[in-house]
Image (cartoon, rainbow, N blue to C red):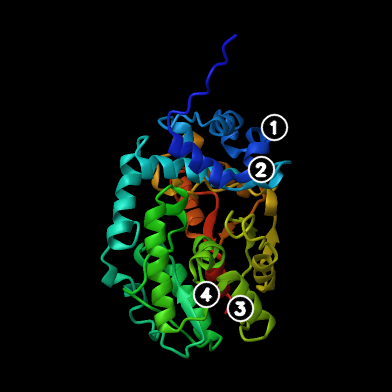
Amino acid sequence: MMEMEVVRPYRDAAEMLLQEGGDPFLHCYQCGLCTGTCPWNLVRKFPLRRLIHQAQLGLVDFESEDVWLCVSCKLCADRCPRGVQVPYIMRSIRRAIVGLGIGPVTDSLRITMKNIAAMGNPPGENREKRSDWAKNLKVKKFTKGTEILYFPCCYQAYDSSLRRVAHAAVGLLQKANVDFGILGSELVCCGESIRKAGAESVFQSLAQSNINAFNEAGVKKIVVTSPHCFHTFRDEYPELGGKFEVYHISQYLSQLISDGRLKFTKELKKKVTHHDSCCLGRYAGIYDEPRFVLNSIPGLELVEMQKTKENALCCGGCAGRIWLDTKKAERFSNLRIEQAVETGAEILATHCPYCMMNFDDSLLGMGKHPPIEVRDITELVQMAI
Protein backbone atom coordinates (compact mmCIF):
# COMPACT_ATOMS: atom_id res chain seq x y z
CA MET A 1 0.00 0.00 0.00
CA MET A 2 1.43 3.33 -1.05
CA GLU A 3 1.90 5.98 1.61
CA MET A 4 0.20 9.29 0.93
CA GLU A 5 2.49 12.27 0.93
CA VAL A 6 1.49 15.19 3.14
CA VAL A 7 0.91 18.21 0.96
CA ARG A 8 2.68 21.39 2.02
CA PRO A 9 1.63 24.04 -0.48
CA TYR A 10 3.55 26.82 1.29
CA ARG A 11 6.82 25.38 2.59
CA ASP A 12 8.21 28.77 3.69
CA ALA A 13 5.00 29.47 5.60
CA ALA A 14 5.07 26.06 7.29
CA GLU A 15 8.65 26.65 8.43
CA MET A 16 7.68 30.08 9.74
CA LEU A 17 4.83 28.60 11.80
CA LEU A 18 7.10 25.92 13.25
CA GLN A 19 9.75 28.45 14.20
CA GLU A 20 7.23 30.73 15.90
CA GLY A 21 5.43 27.96 17.80
CA GLY A 22 8.43 25.85 18.79
CA ASP A 23 8.19 22.48 20.53
CA PRO A 24 4.93 23.16 22.44
CA PHE A 25 3.28 23.76 19.06
CA LEU A 26 4.27 20.28 17.91
CA HIS A 27 3.14 18.77 21.22
CA CYS A 28 -0.44 20.08 20.95
CA TYR A 29 -2.65 17.01 21.42
CA GLN A 30 -5.86 18.62 20.20
CA CYS A 31 -7.70 18.70 23.52
CA GLY A 32 -9.86 21.56 22.27
CA LEU A 33 -9.48 23.69 25.42
CA CYS A 34 -8.40 26.64 23.26
CA THR A 35 -11.65 26.55 21.29
CA GLY A 36 -13.71 26.31 24.47
CA THR A 37 -11.78 29.22 25.99
CA CYS A 38 -11.71 31.59 23.01
CA PRO A 39 -14.11 34.53 23.44
CA TRP A 40 -15.04 34.38 19.76
CA ASN A 41 -17.18 31.36 20.57
CA LEU A 42 -19.37 33.61 22.71
CA VAL A 43 -20.52 35.41 19.57
CA ARG A 44 -19.88 32.97 16.68
CA LYS A 45 -18.20 29.69 15.84
CA PHE A 46 -14.40 29.79 15.69
CA PRO A 47 -12.80 26.30 15.56
CA LEU A 48 -9.41 27.35 16.90
CA ARG A 49 -8.36 23.76 17.64
CA ARG A 50 -8.81 22.85 13.98
CA LEU A 51 -6.85 25.88 12.84
CA ILE A 52 -3.93 24.98 15.11
CA HIS A 53 -3.96 21.40 13.77
CA GLN A 54 -3.92 22.71 10.22
CA ALA A 55 -0.95 24.88 11.16
CA GLN A 56 0.86 21.83 12.55
CA LEU A 57 0.42 20.13 9.18
CA GLY A 58 1.36 23.22 7.20
CA LEU A 59 -2.08 23.21 5.60
CA VAL A 60 -3.56 26.51 6.79
CA ASP A 61 -6.19 28.05 4.55
CA PHE A 62 -4.54 31.45 4.30
CA GLU A 63 -7.55 32.88 2.47
CA SER A 64 -9.98 32.06 5.30
CA GLU A 65 -11.50 34.81 7.46
CA ASP A 66 -10.57 32.70 10.49
CA VAL A 67 -6.87 33.61 10.28
CA TRP A 68 -7.75 37.24 11.07
CA LEU A 69 -10.10 36.59 14.00
CA CYS A 70 -7.65 35.99 16.86
CA VAL A 71 -7.25 39.07 19.06
CA SER A 72 -4.18 37.65 20.85
CA CYS A 73 -5.93 38.04 24.20
CA LYS A 74 -3.74 35.18 25.54
CA LEU A 75 -6.59 33.53 27.45
CA CYS A 76 -6.16 30.25 25.55
CA ALA A 77 -2.37 30.25 25.95
CA ASP A 78 -2.60 30.75 29.71
CA ARG A 79 -4.93 27.75 30.02
CA CYS A 80 -3.24 25.44 27.51
CA PRO A 81 -1.94 22.26 29.25
CA ARG A 82 0.91 22.02 26.73
CA GLY A 83 1.94 25.67 26.81
CA VAL A 84 1.11 26.35 23.17
CA GLN A 85 1.45 30.09 22.55
CA VAL A 86 -1.45 30.49 20.16
CA PRO A 87 -1.10 34.31 19.79
CA TYR A 88 2.42 33.92 18.36
CA ILE A 89 1.31 31.14 16.01
CA MET A 90 -1.49 33.38 14.76
CA ARG A 91 1.03 36.18 14.36
CA SER A 92 3.21 33.96 12.21
CA ILE A 93 0.22 32.95 10.04
CA ARG A 94 -0.42 36.63 9.36
CA ARG A 95 3.28 37.23 8.76
CA ALA A 96 3.10 34.59 6.05
CA ILE A 97 0.11 36.31 4.46
CA VAL A 98 1.60 39.80 4.60
CA GLY A 99 5.22 38.89 3.96
CA LEU A 100 4.81 36.11 1.42
CA GLY A 101 1.63 37.40 -0.18
CA ILE A 102 -0.20 34.08 0.06
CA GLY A 103 -3.55 35.43 1.22
CA PRO A 104 -5.77 38.51 1.12
CA VAL A 105 -5.45 41.52 3.42
CA THR A 106 -8.56 43.67 3.90
CA ASP A 107 -8.48 47.22 2.55
CA SER A 108 -8.79 48.82 5.99
CA LEU A 109 -5.82 46.92 7.35
CA ARG A 110 -3.76 47.46 4.20
CA ILE A 111 -4.37 51.22 4.41
CA THR A 112 -3.37 51.25 8.08
CA MET A 113 -0.19 49.34 7.31
CA LYS A 114 0.67 51.89 4.60
CA ASN A 115 -0.07 54.79 6.95
CA ILE A 116 2.16 53.40 9.67
CA ALA A 117 4.96 52.52 7.26
CA ALA A 118 4.88 55.92 5.55
CA MET A 119 3.85 58.34 8.33
CA GLY A 120 4.65 56.44 11.50
CA ASN A 121 1.10 56.36 12.88
CA PRO A 122 -2.18 54.51 12.12
CA PRO A 123 -4.28 57.56 11.14
CA GLY A 124 -1.64 58.62 8.61
CA GLU A 125 -1.19 62.06 10.18
CA ASN A 126 1.82 64.27 9.57
CA ARG A 127 4.67 63.27 11.88
CA GLU A 128 5.35 66.94 12.60
CA LYS A 129 1.98 67.10 14.39
CA ARG A 130 2.80 64.35 16.89
CA SER A 131 3.33 66.76 19.78
CA ASP A 132 0.49 69.14 18.89
CA TRP A 133 -1.61 67.55 21.64
CA ALA A 134 0.66 69.22 24.21
CA LYS A 135 0.26 72.80 22.99
CA ASN A 136 -0.45 75.25 25.83
CA LEU A 137 0.28 72.57 28.47
CA LYS A 138 3.75 73.93 29.29
CA VAL A 139 5.42 70.57 28.76
CA LYS A 140 9.15 70.70 28.14
CA LYS A 141 10.98 68.80 25.44
CA PHE A 142 12.89 65.81 26.78
CA THR A 143 16.61 66.44 26.97
CA LYS A 144 19.50 64.45 28.38
CA GLY A 145 19.25 64.38 32.16
CA THR A 146 15.44 64.54 32.25
CA GLU A 147 14.18 61.76 34.50
CA ILE A 148 11.08 60.56 32.61
CA LEU A 149 9.99 60.46 28.99
CA TYR A 150 6.20 60.57 28.75
CA PHE A 151 5.04 58.65 25.67
CA PRO A 152 1.34 58.88 24.73
CA CYS A 153 0.18 56.37 22.13
CA CYS A 154 -0.65 57.45 18.57
CA TYR A 155 -4.37 57.74 19.22
CA GLN A 156 -3.87 59.81 22.36
CA ALA A 157 -1.57 62.07 20.36
CA TYR A 158 -3.64 62.42 17.19
CA ASP A 159 -7.28 61.57 18.04
CA SER A 160 -9.09 64.60 19.48
CA SER A 161 -11.46 62.38 21.49
CA LEU A 162 -8.58 60.65 23.28
CA ARG A 163 -6.21 63.56 23.83
CA ARG A 164 -7.93 64.19 27.15
CA VAL A 165 -6.12 61.12 28.54
CA ALA A 166 -2.71 62.53 27.62
CA HIS A 167 -3.76 65.90 29.06
CA ALA A 168 -4.80 64.24 32.33
CA ALA A 169 -1.52 62.32 32.54
CA VAL A 170 0.50 65.49 32.03
CA GLY A 171 -1.53 67.34 34.63
CA LEU A 172 -0.92 64.64 37.21
CA LEU A 173 2.81 64.41 36.50
CA GLN A 174 3.08 68.19 36.83
CA LYS A 175 1.06 68.17 40.06
CA ALA A 176 3.49 65.61 41.51
CA ASN A 177 6.49 67.69 40.38
CA VAL A 178 7.83 64.86 38.24
CA ASP A 179 10.80 65.76 36.07
CA PHE A 180 9.50 64.69 32.68
CA GLY A 181 9.49 65.72 29.05
CA ILE A 182 8.16 64.66 25.68
CA LEU A 183 9.52 64.09 22.20
CA GLY A 184 7.69 64.82 18.96
CA SER A 185 8.40 64.04 15.33
CA GLU A 186 11.38 61.89 16.33
CA LEU A 187 8.95 59.22 17.47
CA VAL A 188 6.69 56.79 15.64
CA CYS A 189 4.10 54.16 16.56
CA CYS A 190 5.38 51.56 19.03
CA GLY A 191 4.45 48.86 16.49
CA GLU A 192 2.82 46.41 18.90
CA SER A 193 -0.46 45.87 17.07
CA ILE A 194 0.91 46.06 13.55
CA ARG A 195 3.36 43.27 14.47
CA LYS A 196 0.52 41.04 15.66
CA ALA A 197 -1.27 41.88 12.42
CA GLY A 198 1.62 40.32 10.50
CA ALA A 199 3.62 43.32 9.29
CA GLU A 200 6.92 42.21 10.81
CA SER A 201 9.16 44.34 8.60
CA VAL A 202 7.14 47.45 9.48
CA PHE A 203 7.46 46.63 13.17
CA GLN A 204 11.21 46.16 12.90
CA SER A 205 11.56 49.56 11.22
CA LEU A 206 9.37 51.31 13.78
CA ALA A 207 11.11 49.72 16.74
CA GLN A 208 14.59 50.56 15.49
CA SER A 209 13.53 54.14 14.78
CA ASN A 210 12.18 54.60 18.30
CA ILE A 211 15.14 52.86 19.92
CA ASN A 212 17.53 55.14 18.07
CA ALA A 213 15.50 58.21 19.06
CA PHE A 214 15.36 57.13 22.71
CA ASN A 215 19.09 56.44 22.85
CA GLU A 216 20.02 59.67 21.09
CA ALA A 217 17.87 61.67 23.53
CA GLY A 218 19.33 59.83 26.53
CA VAL A 219 16.07 58.19 27.61
CA LYS A 220 16.32 55.79 30.55
CA LYS A 221 12.77 55.73 31.97
CA ILE A 222 9.51 55.84 30.03
CA VAL A 223 5.94 56.33 31.29
CA VAL A 224 3.20 55.32 28.85
CA THR A 225 -0.59 55.60 28.87
CA SER A 226 -1.18 52.60 26.61
CA PRO A 227 -0.69 48.95 27.64
CA HIS A 228 0.27 48.21 24.02
CA CYS A 229 3.22 50.59 24.19
CA PHE A 230 4.05 49.19 27.63
CA HIS A 231 4.12 45.59 26.39
CA THR A 232 6.23 46.20 23.33
CA PHE A 233 8.69 48.63 24.97
CA ARG A 234 9.16 46.32 27.95
CA ASP A 235 8.97 42.87 26.36
CA GLU A 236 9.84 43.23 22.67
CA TYR A 237 12.27 46.13 22.26
CA PRO A 238 14.99 44.49 24.42
CA GLU A 239 15.46 41.74 21.82
CA LEU A 240 16.35 44.54 19.37
CA GLY A 241 18.75 46.25 21.76
CA GLY A 242 16.30 48.72 23.28
CA LYS A 243 16.50 48.29 27.04
CA PHE A 244 14.58 50.88 29.03
CA GLU A 245 12.78 51.12 32.37
CA VAL A 246 9.11 51.20 31.39
CA TYR A 247 6.07 52.05 33.52
CA HIS A 248 2.40 52.08 32.68
CA ILE A 249 0.74 55.21 34.07
CA SER A 250 -1.30 53.14 36.55
CA GLN A 251 1.93 51.78 38.04
CA TYR A 252 3.49 55.20 38.22
CA LEU A 253 0.42 56.84 39.76
CA SER A 254 0.28 54.05 42.33
CA GLN A 255 3.82 54.89 43.38
CA LEU A 256 3.21 58.65 43.41
CA ILE A 257 0.14 58.18 45.63
CA SER A 258 1.99 55.78 47.96
CA ASP A 259 4.89 58.24 48.28
CA GLY A 260 2.54 61.11 49.07
CA ARG A 261 3.53 63.06 45.97
CA LEU A 262 -0.06 63.05 44.72
CA LYS A 263 -2.66 64.11 47.27
CA PHE A 264 -6.40 64.10 46.78
CA THR A 265 -8.38 67.21 47.69
CA LYS A 266 -11.87 66.22 46.50
CA GLU A 267 -14.29 63.34 46.77
CA LEU A 268 -15.49 61.49 43.69
CA LYS A 269 -18.74 59.92 44.82
CA LYS A 270 -19.13 57.48 41.97
CA LYS A 271 -19.62 53.73 41.69
CA VAL A 272 -16.89 52.49 39.34
CA THR A 273 -16.05 49.15 37.78
CA HIS A 274 -12.67 48.40 36.23
CA HIS A 275 -11.78 46.64 32.98
CA ASP A 276 -8.47 44.71 32.84
CA SER A 277 -6.88 45.07 29.41
CA CYS A 278 -5.08 42.07 27.91
CA CYS A 279 -1.66 43.71 27.44
CA LEU A 280 -1.49 45.03 31.00
CA GLY A 281 -3.25 42.04 32.51
CA ARG A 282 -2.51 38.64 31.02
CA TYR A 283 0.67 39.76 29.25
CA ALA A 284 2.19 41.71 32.15
CA GLY A 285 0.32 40.39 35.20
CA ILE A 286 -0.50 43.90 36.43
CA TYR A 287 -3.84 43.86 38.25
CA ASP A 288 -3.26 45.40 41.69
CA GLU A 289 -1.88 48.85 40.80
CA PRO A 290 -4.92 50.10 38.86
CA ARG A 291 -7.19 48.95 41.69
CA PHE A 292 -4.95 50.58 44.30
CA VAL A 293 -5.21 53.87 42.41
CA LEU A 294 -9.00 53.66 42.15
CA ASN A 295 -9.44 52.61 45.79
CA SER A 296 -7.28 55.57 46.84
CA ILE A 297 -9.73 58.11 45.38
CA PRO A 298 -11.92 59.50 48.20
CA GLY A 299 -15.60 58.65 47.83
CA LEU A 300 -15.12 56.22 44.94
CA GLU A 301 -16.75 52.80 45.31
CA LEU A 302 -15.06 50.10 43.26
CA VAL A 303 -17.25 47.16 42.23
CA GLU A 304 -15.95 44.20 40.26
CA MET A 305 -17.43 42.62 37.17
CA GLN A 306 -18.07 38.89 36.97
CA LYS A 307 -14.97 38.27 34.83
CA THR A 308 -11.92 40.14 36.06
CA LYS A 309 -8.14 39.98 36.15
CA GLU A 310 -6.79 36.86 34.38
CA ASN A 311 -10.33 35.91 33.32
CA ALA A 312 -11.31 39.33 31.95
CA LEU A 313 -13.02 39.51 28.58
CA CYS A 314 -10.97 41.19 25.85
CA CYS A 315 -12.45 44.35 24.32
CA GLY A 316 -11.79 42.88 20.86
CA GLY A 317 -9.34 45.53 19.64
CA CYS A 318 -5.98 43.80 19.96
CA ALA A 319 -3.77 42.31 17.24
CA GLY A 320 -4.98 44.63 14.51
CA ARG A 321 -8.69 43.98 15.07
CA ILE A 322 -9.09 47.68 15.96
CA TRP A 323 -8.56 48.34 12.23
CA LEU A 324 -10.91 45.62 10.98
CA ASP A 325 -14.68 45.72 10.70
CA THR A 326 -16.52 43.61 13.25
CA LYS A 327 -20.23 42.93 12.97
CA LYS A 328 -22.23 44.57 15.74
CA ALA A 329 -23.53 41.22 16.95
CA GLU A 330 -19.97 39.91 17.27
CA ARG A 331 -18.33 42.71 19.25
CA PHE A 332 -16.75 41.65 22.54
CA SER A 333 -17.01 45.26 23.70
CA ASN A 334 -20.81 44.99 23.64
CA LEU A 335 -20.64 41.99 25.97
CA ARG A 336 -18.18 43.78 28.24
CA ILE A 337 -20.44 46.82 28.47
CA GLU A 338 -23.29 44.54 29.52
CA GLN A 339 -21.09 42.97 32.21
CA ALA A 340 -20.15 46.44 33.46
CA VAL A 341 -23.76 47.62 33.56
CA GLU A 342 -24.75 44.55 35.57
CA THR A 343 -22.57 45.78 38.46
CA GLY A 344 -24.65 48.94 38.80
CA ALA A 345 -21.59 51.08 38.18
CA GLU A 346 -21.90 54.61 36.83
CA ILE A 347 -18.42 54.58 35.28
CA LEU A 348 -16.43 51.93 33.44
CA ALA A 349 -12.77 52.67 34.12
CA THR A 350 -10.11 51.52 31.71
CA HIS A 351 -6.43 52.21 31.10
CA CYS A 352 -6.17 51.44 27.39
CA PRO A 353 -6.99 53.60 24.35
CA TYR A 354 -8.14 50.63 22.27
CA CYS A 355 -10.53 49.52 25.00
CA MET A 356 -11.81 53.07 25.33
CA MET A 357 -12.45 53.38 21.58
CA ASN A 358 -14.28 50.06 21.43
CA PHE A 359 -16.39 50.78 24.52
CA ASP A 360 -17.31 54.24 23.25
CA ASP A 361 -18.29 52.74 19.92
CA SER A 362 -20.48 50.17 21.65
CA LEU A 363 -22.16 52.88 23.71
CA LEU A 364 -22.95 54.86 20.55
CA GLY A 365 -25.07 51.95 19.41
CA MET A 366 -27.08 52.11 22.62
CA GLY A 367 -28.70 55.44 21.81
CA LYS A 368 -28.63 58.91 23.34
CA HIS A 369 -28.75 57.70 26.93
CA PRO A 370 -25.90 55.22 27.42
CA PRO A 371 -26.19 53.22 30.65
CA ILE A 372 -22.58 53.86 31.72
CA GLU A 373 -19.75 56.34 31.17
CA VAL A 374 -16.28 55.29 30.00
CA ARG A 375 -13.28 57.00 31.59
CA ASP A 376 -9.55 56.41 31.77
CA ILE A 377 -8.06 55.94 35.24
CA THR A 378 -5.97 59.10 34.83
CA GLU A 379 -9.13 61.14 34.31
CA LEU A 380 -10.70 59.84 37.51
CA VAL A 381 -7.57 60.66 39.51
CA GLN A 382 -7.48 64.13 38.02
CA MET A 383 -11.11 64.75 39.04
CA ALA A 384 -10.19 64.21 42.69
CA ILE A 385 -6.89 66.15 42.80
Out of 238 and 87, give the one closest to the viewer: 238
In this image, 323 relative to 39: left or right?
A: left
Secondary structure type for disc 3: loop
- How far is the residue under mark 3 from the one under mark 4? 25 Å
Residue tagged 2: 24
Disc assigned to residue 29: 1
- What residue sits 57% from the left and 80% below the top? 385
Going from N to C along the chain, the mark reached first, 1 or 2, is: 2
Secondary structure type for disc 1: loop
Secondary structure type for disc 4: strand
> Could you tell me if the residues under marks 4 and 1 are in contact, i.e. CB atoms within 8 Å?
no
> Could you tell me if the residues under marks 3 and 1 are in contact, i.e. CB atoms within 8 Å?
no
Residue tagged 3: 266
Picture coordinates of residue 46, whole percent (x, y): 55, 30
Out of 187 and 277, give the one closest to the viewer: 187
The amino acid sitting under disc 2 is Pro
Residue 384 occupies which quadrant of the picture? bottom right
Q: Residues within 10 Å of mark 2 (few under 14, many from 20)?
A: some
Out of 170 and 89, give the one closest to the viewer: 89
> Could you tell me if the residues under marks 1 and 2 are in contact, i.e. CB atoms within 8 Å?
no
Residue tagged 4: 223
Q: Nearer the viewer, mark 3 or mark 4?
A: 4
Q: Is residue 251 above or below residue 36?
A: below
Secondary structure type for disc 2: helix
The amino acid sitting under disc 3 is Lys
The amino acid sitting under disc 1 is Tyr
Picture coordinates of residue 98, whole percent (x, y): 37, 43
- How far is the residue under mark 4 from the one under mark 1? 41 Å
